[in-house]
Amino acid sequence: MRRRLLALVCVSASLLSGCGLVPHGGGDGRRTVTVWLMKDSASPEFLRRFTEDFERTHTDLDLDLRIQEWTGIGPKVQAALKADPGDDSGGDTGEGGLPDVIEVGNTQVPQYVDEGGLLDLTLESLRDWGADRWLPGLAEPGQLRGTQYGIPWYAANRVVIYRKDLFEKAGVEAPPRTRAEWLEATRKLDQGPAQGIYLAGQDWYTLSGFIWDEGGELAQERDGGWKGTLDTPAALRGMDFYRRLQSLGDGPADADEEHPPQAGVFAHGDVAQIIAVPGLARAILEQNPRLEGKLGFFPVPGPTAGRPGAVFTGGSDLIVPQNTDDRAGALAVVGALTGEKWDSELARTMDYVPNKADLARAVAGEEGVAAMAKGAARGRATPSTPEWAVVEADNPIKAYMTAVLTGGDPETEARKASRRITEQLQVPLS
């Protein structure tokens, strides 16, 4: 995903040698596997322990881990996928040697699949890597017509962060289990100077979850092309719930959750709830340490009890270029990083959600991450088409939301937005 969902620990310079972690040779018959990982996805200590364990258990392989910046990574990956096999110079990537494994954002995978150059990983994922247990929000963007190219690594998604003291003051004893209970609780919390919830009018990621809960979609593939579907009855029901919830606070109708940053609004105001990744609690406490011990977390409620609401899931997948000169080594790295041992360890270290719902026990001890893991089991991604990037670049969903929240007719505005999405999805990426 292009926007990072969590504030993470930076990679220390002591681990780096140029652009990569110091490799361990290449003599005595050992082969070097080059892996591109994104900055802040894993801590230096995790990478050190993983490298030591991997090289100890794979006596014929060395790892060369090269840390990449998210900014500008797209063209760099595209250059790597198009380079001639065995190009020791790294082609146009600016690196010494081509990667054998690359970490990419889960919503970026469709674009790389469309451009070609990815290895088909279907057989390994079905046979060895437990594909039937993966989180759908990570797995689905990595597929095209039943072929698996992206292998889920880690996930993050939104939860409800709430003020325990304001819940107690309003007589709301426990986090709500259903959307109906959530609305009722938020009405009780929205009294006097307090806001029941701070929900910006253009938080389209949160709206997406409500639409999915109703059985709707942002867009669907029909007759060989993609069409916007915000004007379906199901999608309109999702927008109506968003409108009712958003009215129980003072969130701006014409801005998203970053304008102003909702962490600051929550930290300095009488706000009972926000919808955000749990890692945002750190920023809240930095701005208002008096809230220490007063913050709680629960999954975004769904229509029925016992099943959290659908949420947009961001995170990373691992891909293998077709031009790798060490297919076996690349597969060994992917299998190890995404396997139960190290995927669970990464989740514990970085406050992520593991790539399989049944591994959520790894983060059960952290309230916010545990709530996130429950929601991730119902996680989804944006429509799996490379042209979706065009939609996000000039997002008609945001304008649609503002129009409805300021009194526009929902059906009329939804038709306009759907037509615009359809037009955007018919424009090939350059």
Image (spheres, rainbow, N blue to C red):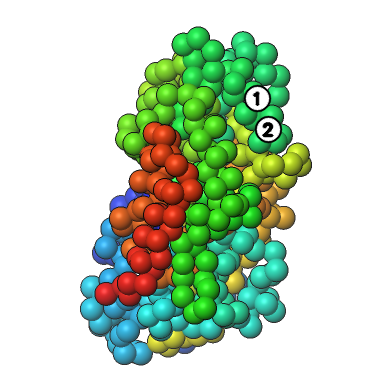
Query: Which quadrant of the rendered structure holds the N terminus?
Result: bottom left
Which residue occupies the extreme bottom position in the image? 85
Q: Residues within 10 Å of mark 2 (few under 14, many from 20)?
A: some
Quadrant location of residue 257?
A: top left
Q: Residue 126 location, x and y as percent? A: 67, 77
Image point (46%, 11%), residue name: 193
Residue 180 numbered mark, or none: 2
Image point (35%, 53%), residue name: 395
Residue 184 numbered mark, or none: 1
Which residue is more in the foreground, 71 or 337? 71
Query: Which quadrant of the rendered structure holds the C terminus?
Result: bottom left
Residue 212 in view in this figure: no
Up the image or down, 306 lies above or below 45; here it is above
For the residues bearing labels 2 and 1, Cβ distance under 8 angstroms: yes
Mark 1 element type: helix
Which residue is more in the foreground, 102 or 137? 137
